[in-house]
Amino acid sequence: MSGIVLSASVRQNLLSLQSTAELLSTTQNRLATGNKVNSALDNPTNFFTAQGLNNRSNDINNLLDSIGNGVQILQAANTGLTSLQKLVDTAKSIANQVLQTTVGYSTKASATTTVGAVGTAADLTTGGTTTLQGKTVIFTPATGSALTLTFSNVAGAGNVNSLDALNAAIGAAGIGVTASISGTGFLTFTSSNDNASQAITVAGGAAANTVQITGTTVAAAPVAAVADAGSQAIRANLLNQYNGILSQITNTAQDASFNGINLLNGDTLKLTFNETGKSTLSITGVTYGASGLGLSALVSGTDFLDSASANKALTALGAASTSLRTEASALGSNLSIVQIRQDFSKNLINVLQTGASNLTLADTNEEAANSQALSTRQSIAVSALALANQSQQSVLQLLR
């Protein structure tokens, strides 16, 4: 049986109808998917370029999670620093309360000269019945360098001739005593107000919280300090509060972690900003417990007994505050950098996705118009094919 033979007009209309159907199918697919390039067969160049852009976009988007965690780690550390600063300020308040309480001693330690009754004369080398000309006194504190002074009316380093000059030299050297003339006319050295808990010895080495005064001008039996029980009870209570604050400082620093990383407990945070791993930021943490801030627990019966101990604690607390503020500034700078890179990554992802979309997305308005046009063309092709068939049917009628 021979094949069916179509006339030229029928064949032409049939081909036109097939072409229109194929185009209509493509248009409908684009409208359904929203893409003009759905596979490498549609447009190899655009398809693989868009795929590369989308892959990079996905890689950077995956990094955003770790960057977001990094932001939270920095914020946790910053929150910890804020709390530590408040605790340090509380400790300062306690130390200042020590300064504002009454002196912890009803009688302060003292030692009096045995030679040189200077009377009330301002010039220690000329006044009184016997002068101190040529005499020497040596002050040896428990910590620090010894101070040697010679009573002489000859100007020179280490020479003093008046009560004011003597006290000025003692104060400049940080020796916690004050010189005065006693009621009997002798020169007396008394522990200063700030160093009221200090003992004075005239023989042997200077023990803790003790100043040793030796030389030809010093008595053999110094007067010991007498503590005020009520004042010392208040100070002991403040010492316990202070040590409790130091414990909270250490605990707070250890608790300032996020996702297992604590920048206040010596950990290091490393962030990666791009898909190749070449753009990174490493943030080295600090150890900011009480010891890391240079703060030591006070010793009962030794510390906070007088103003000198409180001032020493305030000095350490001031240094701790400076360290906290410096670290807060550094964390703030790093947090700003991380947030800038986070925003940059988000914007870059948008750029990459937009670029990929420009290569593959279909224009829905254009495709909708094409669909309508192709539907019309398809209708016309069907009509044309019907007309072509009618001409053959007319010949058939003639044969009948």
Image: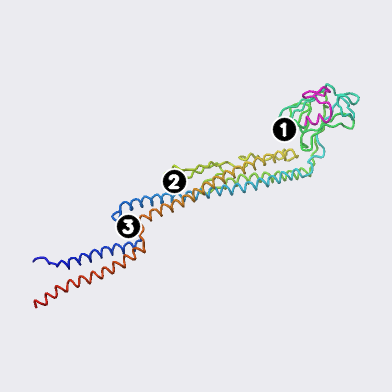
Mark 3 lies on a secondary structure that is loop
Q: Which residue is mark 2?
A: 274
Image depth: mark 1 or mark 2 in front = 2
Q: Which of 289/388 is in front?
A: 388
For this view, does 347 lie left or right of residue 17?
right
> Relative to 65, does residue 208 appear above or below in the rendering?
above
Residue 205 placement (x, y as % from top left):
74, 27
> For the residue carrying disc 2, how many other residues have a C-alpha within 10 Å: few (<14), some (14-19), or many (20+)?
some
What is the three-letter code of the residue carrying label 3? Asn
Answer with mark 1 or mark 3, whichever residue precedes in sequence: 3
> For the residue carrying disc 1, how many other residues have a C-alpha within 10 Å: few (<14), some (14-19), or many (20+)?
few
Q: Which of 351/222 is in front?
A: 351
Is 161 covered by the magenta stretch? yes
Q: Which of 145/122 is in front?
A: 122
Answer with mark 1 or mark 2, whichever residue precedes in sequence: 1
For this view, does 244 lie left or right of residue 184?
left
Mark 1 lies on a secondary structure that is loop
Q: Which residue is mark 1?
A: 208
Q: Which residue is mark 3?
A: 38
Image depth: mark 3 or mark 2 in front = 3
Q: What residue lies at 85% left-to-right and 22% top-to-bottom? A: 133
Answer with mark 3 or mark 2, whichever residue precedes in sequence: 3
CA separation in Å, label 1 and label 2: 59 Å
Image depth: mark 1 or mark 3 in front = 3
CA separation in Å, label 1 and label 3: 86 Å
What is the three-letter code of the residue carrying label 2? Asn
> For the residue carrying disc 3, how many other residues have a C-alpha within 10 Å: few (<14), some (14-19), or many (20+)?
some
What is the three-letter code of the residue carrying label 1? Ala
